[in-house]
Image (cartoon, helix red, strand yellow):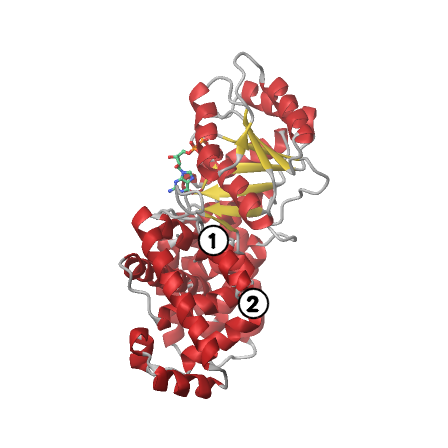
Amino acid sequence: MFENLSERLSGVFDRLTKQGALSEEDVKTALREVRVALLEADVSLPVARDFVKAVQGKATGQSVTRSVTPGQQVVKIVHDELIHVLSGSEDPGKLKIDNPPAPILMVGLQGSGKTTTTAKLAKRLKDRDGKRVLMASLDVNRPAAMEQLQILGLQIGVDTLPIVKGEDPVTIAKRAKTQAALGGYDVYMLDTAGRLHIDQELIAQAAAVRDAVAPRETLLVVDGLTGQDAVNVATEFDDKIGVSGVVLTRMDGDGRGGAALSMRAVTGKPIRFVGLGEKMDAIETFEPERIAGRILGMGDIVSLVEKAQATLEVEQAERMMKRFSKGQFNMNDLRTQLEQMMKMGGMQGMMSMLPGAAKMQKQMEGSGVDDKMLVRQIALIQSMTKKERANPQILQASRKKRIAKGAGLEVAELNKLLKMHRQMSDVMKKMGKGGMLKQAMKGMF
Ligand code: GDP
Protein backbone atom coordinates (compact mmCIF):
# COMPACT_ATOMS: atom_id res chain seq x y z
CA MET A 1 0.00 0.00 0.00
CA PHE A 2 1.24 3.48 -0.86
CA GLU A 3 4.70 2.34 -1.97
CA ASN A 4 5.18 5.10 -4.49
CA LEU A 5 4.24 7.94 -2.24
CA SER A 6 6.14 6.48 0.64
CA GLU A 7 9.32 5.99 -1.38
CA ARG A 8 9.21 9.49 -2.73
CA LEU A 9 8.67 11.06 0.64
CA SER A 10 11.36 9.05 2.33
CA GLY A 11 13.73 10.26 -0.41
CA VAL A 12 12.82 13.83 0.42
CA PHE A 13 13.19 13.36 4.14
CA ASP A 14 16.44 11.46 3.79
CA ARG A 15 17.93 14.55 2.26
CA LEU A 16 16.42 16.76 4.92
CA THR A 17 17.56 14.72 7.87
CA LYS A 18 21.16 14.80 6.61
CA GLN A 19 21.30 18.55 6.95
CA GLY A 20 22.04 20.25 10.22
CA ALA A 21 19.48 22.99 10.48
CA LEU A 22 16.28 23.60 8.62
CA SER A 23 16.11 26.81 6.62
CA GLU A 24 12.93 28.22 5.19
CA GLU A 25 14.25 27.31 1.76
CA ASP A 26 14.66 23.70 2.89
CA VAL A 27 11.08 23.55 4.05
CA LYS A 28 9.92 24.95 0.72
CA THR A 29 12.01 22.49 -1.30
CA ALA A 30 10.81 19.58 0.77
CA LEU A 31 7.19 20.59 0.53
CA ARG A 32 7.42 21.08 -3.23
CA GLU A 33 8.46 17.48 -3.44
CA VAL A 34 5.76 16.43 -1.01
CA ARG A 35 3.25 18.10 -3.29
CA VAL A 36 4.58 16.39 -6.43
CA ALA A 37 4.55 13.09 -4.62
CA LEU A 38 0.98 13.58 -3.51
CA LEU A 39 -0.11 14.46 -7.03
CA GLU A 40 1.70 11.47 -8.44
CA ALA A 41 -0.08 9.33 -5.90
CA ASP A 42 -3.37 10.51 -7.34
CA VAL A 43 -4.21 12.96 -4.61
CA SER A 44 -6.30 15.67 -6.22
CA LEU A 45 -4.65 19.04 -6.87
CA PRO A 46 -6.67 21.15 -4.45
CA VAL A 47 -6.19 18.59 -1.69
CA ALA A 48 -2.45 18.42 -2.26
CA ARG A 49 -2.26 22.20 -2.33
CA ASP A 50 -4.20 22.61 0.90
CA PHE A 51 -2.22 19.89 2.55
CA VAL A 52 1.12 21.45 1.70
CA LYS A 53 -0.09 24.87 2.76
CA ALA A 54 -1.16 23.58 6.16
CA VAL A 55 2.15 21.84 6.69
CA GLN A 56 4.13 24.85 5.56
CA GLY A 57 2.41 27.10 8.03
CA LYS A 58 3.09 24.74 10.88
CA ALA A 59 6.66 23.94 9.83
CA THR A 60 7.66 27.56 9.42
CA GLY A 61 6.20 28.47 12.77
CA GLN A 62 8.25 25.73 14.38
CA SER A 63 11.43 26.43 12.50
CA VAL A 64 12.04 29.32 14.90
CA THR A 65 12.55 26.86 17.71
CA ARG A 66 15.45 25.31 15.76
CA SER A 67 14.92 21.71 16.61
CA VAL A 68 18.01 19.53 16.84
CA THR A 69 16.64 17.25 14.13
CA PRO A 70 14.70 19.53 11.84
CA GLY A 71 14.11 16.76 9.31
CA GLN A 72 12.33 14.68 11.88
CA GLN A 73 10.36 17.68 12.94
CA VAL A 74 9.01 18.13 9.42
CA VAL A 75 8.30 14.42 9.17
CA LYS A 76 6.32 14.69 12.36
CA ILE A 77 4.37 17.69 11.13
CA VAL A 78 3.56 16.02 7.81
CA HIS A 79 2.63 12.84 9.66
CA ASP A 80 0.34 14.67 12.09
CA GLU A 81 -1.28 16.59 9.28
CA LEU A 82 -1.90 13.39 7.32
CA ILE A 83 -3.59 11.85 10.34
CA HIS A 84 -5.55 15.03 10.85
CA VAL A 85 -6.88 14.99 7.27
CA LEU A 86 -7.52 11.25 7.25
CA SER A 87 -9.27 11.00 10.62
CA GLY A 88 -12.98 11.00 11.16
CA SER A 89 -14.46 11.98 14.47
CA GLU A 90 -15.86 8.59 15.45
CA ASP A 91 -14.59 5.04 15.65
CA PRO A 92 -14.66 4.02 11.97
CA GLY A 93 -15.23 0.33 12.67
CA LYS A 94 -18.29 0.88 14.84
CA LEU A 95 -21.40 0.38 12.73
CA LYS A 96 -24.70 1.80 13.93
CA ILE A 97 -26.66 -1.36 14.43
CA ASP A 98 -28.72 -0.79 17.57
CA ASN A 99 -32.50 -1.34 17.43
CA PRO A 100 -32.55 -4.59 15.50
CA PRO A 101 -33.03 -5.33 12.71
CA ALA A 102 -30.71 -2.56 11.51
CA PRO A 103 -30.53 -2.02 7.77
CA ILE A 104 -27.16 -1.40 6.14
CA LEU A 105 -27.20 -0.21 2.55
CA MET A 106 -24.21 -1.04 0.37
CA VAL A 107 -23.71 1.12 -2.71
CA GLY A 108 -21.03 1.50 -5.34
CA LEU A 109 -20.06 0.85 -8.92
CA GLN A 110 -19.96 -2.59 -10.45
CA GLY A 111 -16.60 -4.25 -9.88
CA SER A 112 -15.73 -2.04 -6.93
CA GLY A 113 -15.90 -5.06 -4.63
CA LYS A 114 -19.34 -4.27 -3.25
CA THR A 115 -20.65 -7.82 -3.02
CA THR A 116 -17.40 -9.12 -1.58
CA THR A 117 -17.35 -6.32 0.97
CA THR A 118 -20.97 -6.98 1.94
CA ALA A 119 -20.06 -10.56 2.76
CA LYS A 120 -16.83 -9.57 4.53
CA LEU A 121 -18.69 -7.14 6.78
CA ALA A 122 -21.45 -9.67 7.44
CA LYS A 123 -18.84 -12.17 8.52
CA ARG A 124 -17.17 -9.60 10.72
CA LEU A 125 -20.46 -8.71 12.39
CA LYS A 126 -21.17 -12.39 12.96
CA ASP A 127 -17.72 -13.43 14.18
CA ARG A 128 -16.68 -10.39 16.17
CA ASP A 129 -19.94 -9.04 17.46
CA GLY A 130 -21.97 -12.24 17.50
CA LYS A 131 -24.67 -10.64 15.40
CA ARG A 132 -27.23 -12.50 13.32
CA VAL A 133 -27.03 -11.07 9.84
CA LEU A 134 -29.25 -11.45 6.79
CA MET A 135 -27.92 -10.45 3.38
CA ALA A 136 -29.97 -9.66 0.30
CA SER A 137 -28.90 -8.81 -3.23
CA LEU A 138 -30.97 -6.19 -5.02
CA ASP A 139 -29.14 -6.56 -8.32
CA VAL A 140 -32.15 -7.65 -10.35
CA ASN A 141 -30.40 -7.05 -13.67
CA ARG A 142 -27.60 -9.45 -12.93
CA PRO A 143 -28.78 -12.84 -11.65
CA ALA A 144 -25.13 -13.86 -11.38
CA ALA A 145 -24.58 -11.15 -8.79
CA MET A 146 -27.47 -12.47 -6.71
CA GLU A 147 -26.09 -15.97 -6.87
CA GLN A 148 -22.63 -14.71 -5.98
CA LEU A 149 -23.93 -13.29 -2.72
CA GLN A 150 -25.78 -16.50 -1.99
CA ILE A 151 -22.62 -18.55 -2.50
CA LEU A 152 -20.59 -16.22 -0.30
CA GLY A 153 -23.32 -16.49 2.34
CA LEU A 154 -23.04 -20.27 2.37
CA GLN A 155 -19.28 -20.00 2.55
CA ILE A 156 -19.26 -17.72 5.60
CA GLY A 157 -22.35 -19.16 7.29
CA VAL A 158 -24.52 -16.07 6.91
CA ASP A 159 -28.13 -16.32 5.71
CA THR A 160 -29.22 -14.74 2.46
CA LEU A 161 -32.73 -13.77 1.50
CA PRO A 162 -34.16 -16.39 -0.88
CA ILE A 163 -34.08 -15.19 -4.47
CA VAL A 164 -37.50 -14.58 -6.02
CA LYS A 165 -37.40 -13.95 -9.75
CA GLY A 166 -39.15 -10.88 -11.17
CA GLU A 167 -39.15 -8.72 -8.03
CA ASP A 168 -37.96 -5.13 -8.17
CA PRO A 169 -35.27 -3.85 -5.78
CA VAL A 170 -37.67 -2.01 -3.46
CA THR A 171 -39.86 -5.10 -3.10
CA ILE A 172 -36.82 -7.21 -2.28
CA ALA A 173 -35.62 -4.63 0.25
CA LYS A 174 -39.02 -4.66 1.97
CA ARG A 175 -39.06 -8.43 1.97
CA ALA A 176 -35.62 -8.41 3.56
CA LYS A 177 -36.88 -6.01 6.23
CA THR A 178 -39.87 -8.24 7.05
CA GLN A 179 -37.80 -11.38 7.01
CA ALA A 180 -35.16 -9.79 9.24
CA ALA A 181 -37.80 -8.75 11.77
CA LEU A 182 -39.59 -12.10 11.73
CA GLY A 183 -36.41 -14.11 11.80
CA GLY A 184 -34.89 -12.23 14.73
CA TYR A 185 -31.91 -10.88 12.81
CA ASP A 186 -29.82 -8.05 14.26
CA VAL A 187 -28.76 -6.64 10.93
CA TYR A 188 -29.83 -6.91 7.32
CA MET A 189 -27.48 -5.87 4.58
CA LEU A 190 -28.71 -4.75 1.20
CA ASP A 191 -26.29 -5.18 -1.67
CA THR A 192 -27.61 -2.75 -4.27
CA ALA A 193 -27.07 -3.05 -8.02
CA GLY A 194 -23.89 -1.68 -9.50
CA ARG A 195 -23.17 -0.22 -12.91
CA LEU A 196 -19.94 0.46 -14.66
CA HIS A 197 -20.68 4.18 -14.49
CA ILE A 198 -23.01 6.26 -12.46
CA ASP A 199 -26.32 6.77 -14.25
CA GLN A 200 -29.66 8.19 -13.30
CA GLU A 201 -31.41 4.85 -13.06
CA LEU A 202 -28.81 3.48 -10.69
CA ILE A 203 -29.07 6.51 -8.43
CA ALA A 204 -32.88 6.53 -8.56
CA GLN A 205 -32.98 2.86 -7.63
CA ALA A 206 -30.63 3.27 -4.68
CA ALA A 207 -32.59 6.31 -3.51
CA ALA A 208 -35.89 4.40 -3.66
CA VAL A 209 -34.42 1.59 -1.59
CA ARG A 210 -33.02 4.10 0.87
CA ASP A 211 -36.46 5.66 1.27
CA ALA A 212 -38.06 2.24 1.74
CA VAL A 213 -35.84 1.02 4.58
CA ALA A 214 -34.17 4.14 6.08
CA PRO A 215 -30.71 2.57 6.42
CA ARG A 216 -28.76 3.06 9.63
CA GLU A 217 -25.57 3.06 7.58
CA THR A 218 -25.06 3.64 3.88
CA LEU A 219 -21.61 2.44 2.98
CA LEU A 220 -20.07 3.37 -0.32
CA VAL A 221 -17.64 0.81 -1.67
CA VAL A 222 -14.95 2.25 -3.93
CA ASP A 223 -11.99 0.71 -5.64
CA GLY A 224 -8.94 2.25 -3.98
CA LEU A 225 -6.94 1.79 -7.16
CA THR A 226 -9.05 4.16 -9.20
CA GLY A 227 -7.65 7.29 -7.61
CA GLN A 228 -9.27 10.50 -8.71
CA ASP A 229 -12.24 8.68 -10.25
CA ALA A 230 -13.01 7.20 -6.88
CA VAL A 231 -13.31 10.68 -5.45
CA ASN A 232 -15.73 11.75 -8.19
CA VAL A 233 -17.82 8.64 -7.62
CA ALA A 234 -17.91 9.31 -3.89
CA THR A 235 -18.95 12.92 -4.37
CA GLU A 236 -21.74 11.90 -6.72
CA PHE A 237 -23.09 9.13 -4.50
CA ASP A 238 -22.94 11.32 -1.44
CA ASP A 239 -24.75 14.19 -3.14
CA LYS A 240 -27.53 11.99 -4.50
CA ILE A 241 -27.95 9.29 -1.88
CA GLY A 242 -26.03 10.41 1.16
CA VAL A 243 -23.40 8.05 2.49
CA SER A 244 -22.31 7.48 6.07
CA GLY A 245 -18.92 6.12 5.22
CA VAL A 246 -16.57 4.75 2.62
CA VAL A 247 -14.95 1.36 2.23
CA LEU A 248 -11.80 1.44 0.13
CA THR A 249 -11.10 -1.89 -1.52
CA ARG A 250 -7.96 -3.30 -3.15
CA MET A 251 -5.68 -1.56 -0.71
CA ASP A 252 -3.62 -4.75 -0.75
CA GLY A 253 -2.37 -4.03 -4.26
CA ASP A 254 0.42 -1.68 -5.20
CA GLY A 255 -2.10 1.09 -5.57
CA ARG A 256 -1.08 4.63 -5.05
CA GLY A 257 -3.45 5.21 -2.18
CA GLY A 258 -3.86 8.91 -2.75
CA ALA A 259 -7.57 8.23 -3.02
CA ALA A 260 -7.76 7.78 0.74
CA LEU A 261 -6.47 11.28 1.32
CA SER A 262 -8.49 13.14 -1.28
CA MET A 263 -11.61 11.10 -0.66
CA ARG A 264 -11.57 12.20 2.92
CA ALA A 265 -10.66 15.79 2.18
CA VAL A 266 -13.12 16.29 -0.69
CA THR A 267 -16.20 14.43 0.51
CA GLY A 268 -15.64 14.89 4.21
CA LYS A 269 -16.90 11.33 4.61
CA PRO A 270 -15.01 9.04 6.95
CA ILE A 271 -13.20 6.05 5.51
CA ARG A 272 -14.51 3.21 7.65
CA PHE A 273 -12.85 0.05 6.35
CA VAL A 274 -10.19 -1.02 3.90
CA GLY A 275 -10.34 -4.17 1.80
CA LEU A 276 -7.05 -6.02 1.73
CA GLY A 277 -7.66 -9.00 -0.53
CA GLU A 278 -10.20 -11.39 -1.93
CA LYS A 279 -10.53 -13.61 1.13
CA MET A 280 -13.48 -13.15 3.45
CA ASP A 281 -11.27 -12.03 6.36
CA ALA A 282 -9.38 -9.49 4.27
CA ILE A 283 -10.99 -6.40 5.72
CA GLU A 284 -9.73 -4.06 8.42
CA THR A 285 -10.94 -1.00 10.21
CA PHE A 286 -9.43 2.10 8.67
CA GLU A 287 -6.61 3.39 10.83
CA PRO A 288 -5.27 6.83 9.90
CA GLU A 289 -2.10 6.35 11.97
CA ARG A 290 -1.15 3.24 10.09
CA ILE A 291 -1.86 4.74 6.71
CA ALA A 292 0.01 7.93 7.55
CA GLY A 293 2.96 5.90 8.75
CA ARG A 294 3.02 3.96 5.53
CA ILE A 295 2.69 7.07 3.41
CA LEU A 296 5.75 8.48 5.11
CA GLY A 297 7.73 5.27 4.80
CA MET A 298 8.28 5.08 8.52
CA GLY A 299 7.26 1.47 8.45
CA ASP A 300 4.29 0.04 10.13
CA ILE A 301 5.62 -1.69 13.17
CA VAL A 302 2.22 -2.56 14.61
CA SER A 303 0.98 -4.45 11.59
CA LEU A 304 4.32 -6.15 11.05
CA VAL A 305 4.42 -7.43 14.59
CA GLU A 306 0.83 -8.59 14.37
CA LYS A 307 1.48 -10.41 11.13
CA ALA A 308 4.60 -12.10 12.42
CA GLN A 309 2.76 -13.24 15.51
CA ALA A 310 -0.19 -14.64 13.56
CA THR A 311 2.12 -16.51 11.19
CA LEU A 312 4.06 -17.92 14.09
CA GLU A 313 0.92 -19.23 15.78
CA VAL A 314 -0.39 -20.79 12.61
CA GLU A 315 2.95 -22.45 11.90
CA GLN A 316 3.14 -23.71 15.46
CA ALA A 317 -0.38 -25.10 15.24
CA GLU A 318 0.36 -26.81 11.95
CA ARG A 319 3.52 -28.42 13.28
CA MET A 320 1.65 -29.66 16.32
CA MET A 321 -1.16 -30.97 14.20
CA LYS A 322 1.20 -33.01 12.06
CA ARG A 323 2.80 -34.64 15.07
CA PHE A 324 -0.47 -35.28 16.89
CA SER A 325 -2.02 -37.09 13.97
CA LYS A 326 0.99 -39.42 13.99
CA GLY A 327 0.32 -40.15 17.63
CA GLN A 328 3.25 -38.04 18.84
CA PHE A 329 1.75 -36.20 21.78
CA ASN A 330 4.15 -35.63 24.64
CA MET A 331 4.00 -33.81 27.95
CA ASN A 332 5.22 -30.54 26.42
CA ASP A 333 2.28 -30.70 24.03
CA LEU A 334 -0.08 -31.46 26.88
CA ARG A 335 1.28 -28.48 28.75
CA THR A 336 0.73 -26.22 25.74
CA GLN A 337 -2.81 -27.54 25.51
CA LEU A 338 -3.44 -26.97 29.21
CA GLU A 339 -2.14 -23.43 28.95
CA GLN A 340 -4.34 -22.85 25.95
CA MET A 341 -7.28 -24.13 27.97
CA MET A 342 -6.55 -21.62 30.69
CA LYS A 343 -6.38 -18.86 28.10
CA MET A 344 -9.58 -19.93 26.47
CA GLY A 345 -11.90 -19.86 29.40
CA GLY A 346 -10.94 -23.09 31.08
CA MET A 347 -12.01 -26.64 30.59
CA GLN A 348 -15.58 -26.09 29.46
CA GLY A 349 -14.70 -23.56 26.79
CA MET A 350 -11.96 -25.72 25.44
CA MET A 351 -13.88 -28.97 25.40
CA SER A 352 -16.80 -27.44 23.61
CA MET A 353 -14.49 -26.67 20.70
CA LEU A 354 -13.22 -30.18 20.24
CA PRO A 355 -15.56 -32.20 18.07
CA GLY A 356 -15.84 -35.79 19.17
CA ALA A 357 -14.48 -35.00 22.60
CA ALA A 358 -17.83 -35.21 24.35
CA LYS A 359 -17.06 -38.66 25.65
CA MET A 360 -13.78 -37.53 27.07
CA GLN A 361 -15.48 -34.57 28.65
CA LYS A 362 -17.86 -36.86 30.53
CA GLN A 363 -14.98 -38.94 31.79
CA MET A 364 -13.22 -35.82 32.96
CA GLU A 365 -16.27 -34.54 34.78
CA GLY A 366 -16.41 -37.87 36.57
CA SER A 367 -12.79 -37.59 37.58
CA GLY A 368 -13.22 -34.15 39.09
CA VAL A 369 -11.31 -32.18 36.48
CA ASP A 370 -11.72 -28.46 36.99
CA ASP A 371 -9.76 -25.30 36.35
CA LYS A 372 -7.82 -25.54 39.60
CA MET A 373 -6.75 -28.90 38.41
CA LEU A 374 -5.28 -27.31 35.30
CA VAL A 375 -2.92 -25.34 37.48
CA ARG A 376 -1.89 -28.47 39.40
CA GLN A 377 -1.37 -30.39 36.19
CA ILE A 378 0.84 -27.70 34.76
CA ALA A 379 2.84 -27.75 37.99
CA LEU A 380 3.32 -31.51 37.65
CA ILE A 381 4.59 -31.18 34.12
CA GLN A 382 6.95 -28.41 35.22
CA SER A 383 8.35 -30.78 37.78
CA MET A 384 9.36 -33.32 35.12
CA THR A 385 12.76 -33.41 33.45
CA LYS A 386 13.12 -32.67 29.77
CA LYS A 387 13.54 -36.35 29.04
CA GLU A 388 10.44 -37.28 31.01
CA ARG A 389 8.33 -34.71 29.24
CA ALA A 390 9.39 -36.03 25.86
CA ASN A 391 8.87 -39.68 26.88
CA PRO A 392 6.27 -40.00 29.63
CA GLN A 393 6.46 -43.81 29.20
CA ILE A 394 9.65 -43.87 31.25
CA LEU A 395 7.84 -42.70 34.38
CA GLN A 396 8.31 -45.48 36.93
CA ALA A 397 7.49 -45.38 40.64
CA SER A 398 10.60 -43.51 41.81
CA ARG A 399 10.38 -40.88 39.13
CA LYS A 400 6.68 -40.41 39.85
CA LYS A 401 7.39 -39.87 43.53
CA ARG A 402 10.01 -37.24 42.77
CA ILE A 403 7.75 -35.40 40.31
CA ALA A 404 4.76 -35.37 42.64
CA LYS A 405 6.91 -34.15 45.51
CA GLY A 406 8.40 -31.44 43.35
CA ALA A 407 4.91 -30.14 42.60
CA GLY A 408 3.77 -30.59 46.19
CA LEU A 409 1.13 -33.10 45.15
CA GLU A 410 0.21 -36.77 45.52
CA VAL A 411 1.31 -39.49 43.11
CA ALA A 412 -2.38 -40.27 42.54
CA GLU A 413 -2.75 -36.84 41.00
CA LEU A 414 0.14 -37.54 38.65
CA ASN A 415 -1.45 -40.84 37.68
CA LYS A 416 -4.60 -39.00 36.74
CA LEU A 417 -2.58 -36.64 34.57
CA LEU A 418 -0.86 -39.55 32.86
CA LYS A 419 -4.19 -41.24 32.23
CA MET A 420 -5.54 -38.06 30.73
CA HIS A 421 -2.47 -37.75 28.57
CA ARG A 422 -2.99 -41.28 27.24
CA GLN A 423 -6.64 -40.61 26.53
CA MET A 424 -5.91 -37.34 24.82
CA SER A 425 -3.22 -38.81 22.63
CA ASP A 426 -5.63 -41.60 21.62
CA VAL A 427 -8.30 -39.06 20.72
CA MET A 428 -5.78 -36.91 18.82
CA LYS A 429 -4.62 -39.95 16.87
CA LYS A 430 -8.16 -40.95 15.96
CA MET A 431 -9.15 -37.43 15.07
CA GLY A 432 -5.99 -36.98 13.05
CA LYS A 433 -6.96 -39.94 10.90
CA GLY A 434 -10.41 -38.56 10.22
CA GLY A 435 -9.15 -35.04 9.51
CA MET A 436 -11.13 -33.82 12.48
CA LEU A 437 -8.08 -32.64 14.34
CA LYS A 438 -7.40 -30.09 11.66
CA GLN A 439 -10.88 -28.69 12.11
CA ALA A 440 -10.61 -28.59 15.85
CA MET A 441 -7.23 -26.88 15.79
CA LYS A 442 -8.51 -24.28 13.37
CA GLY A 443 -10.96 -23.14 15.98
CA MET A 444 -8.27 -22.95 18.62
CA PHE A 445 -5.66 -20.78 16.96
P1 GDP B 1 -19.03 -5.85 -7.21
O1 GDP B 1 -19.34 -5.94 -8.68
O2 GDP B 1 -18.79 -4.45 -6.79
O3 GDP B 1 -20.00 -6.55 -6.37
O4 GDP B 1 -17.60 -6.53 -7.04
P2 GDP B 1 -17.22 -7.95 -6.44
O5 GDP B 1 -17.51 -8.00 -5.00
O6 GDP B 1 -17.80 -9.00 -7.30
O7 GDP B 1 -15.63 -7.90 -6.61
C1 GDP B 1 -15.00 -7.85 -7.85
C2 GDP B 1 -13.65 -8.55 -7.74
O8 GDP B 1 -12.79 -7.82 -6.87
C3 GDP B 1 -13.73 -9.94 -7.14
O9 GDP B 1 -12.88 -10.79 -7.86
C4 GDP B 1 -13.24 -9.76 -5.73
O10 GDP B 1 -12.66 -10.93 -5.22
C5 GDP B 1 -12.24 -8.65 -5.88
N1 GDP B 1 -12.04 -7.87 -4.65
C6 GDP B 1 -12.97 -7.31 -3.86
N2 GDP B 1 -12.41 -6.65 -2.83
C7 GDP B 1 -11.07 -6.80 -2.96
C8 GDP B 1 -9.93 -6.34 -2.21
O11 GDP B 1 -10.01 -5.64 -1.19
N3 GDP B 1 -8.70 -6.70 -2.69
C9 GDP B 1 -8.55 -7.47 -3.80
N4 GDP B 1 -7.32 -7.78 -4.18
N5 GDP B 1 -9.60 -7.90 -4.53
C10 GDP B 1 -10.84 -7.58 -4.12
Measured from the top left, where is residue 151 in percent x and y? 44, 30
Q: Which residue is mark 1?
A: 359
Mark 2 near mark 1, Cβ–Cβ under 8 Å? no
Residue 402 in view in this figure: yes
Q: Quadrant of the C terminus?
A: bottom left
Q: How many marks?
A: 2
* Label 2: how many Cα within 10 Å (few below 14, some 14–19, many 20+): few
- What's the residue at 43%, 69% (across, down)? 26
Q: Residue furthest top?
A: 166
- What's the residue at 53%, 56% (across, down)? 288
Circle 1: element type: helix
Of residues 372 and 311, the one drawn nearer to the viewer in this rendering? 372
Q: Amino acid at mark 2?
A: Asp
| Quadrant observed for ligand 1 in the rendered image | top left
Q: Which image quadrant is residue 210 in?
A: top right
Q: Earlier in the sequence, mark 2 or mark 1?
A: 1
* Label 1: how many Cα within 10 Å (few below 14, some 14–19, many 20+): few
Q: Which image quadrant is residue 310 in?
A: bottom left
Q: Which image quadrant is residue 332 in?
A: bottom left
Does 259 appear above or below 30? Answer: above
Measured from the top left, where is residue 323 in percent x and y? 28, 61
Q: Amino acid at mark 1?
A: Lys
Q: Nearer the viewer, mark 2 or mark 1?
A: 1
Q: Which residue is mark 2?
A: 370
- What's the residue at 39%, 41% (across, down)? 278
Of residues 351 and 50, the one drawn nearer to the viewer in this rendering? 351
Does 166 appear above or below 368? Answer: above
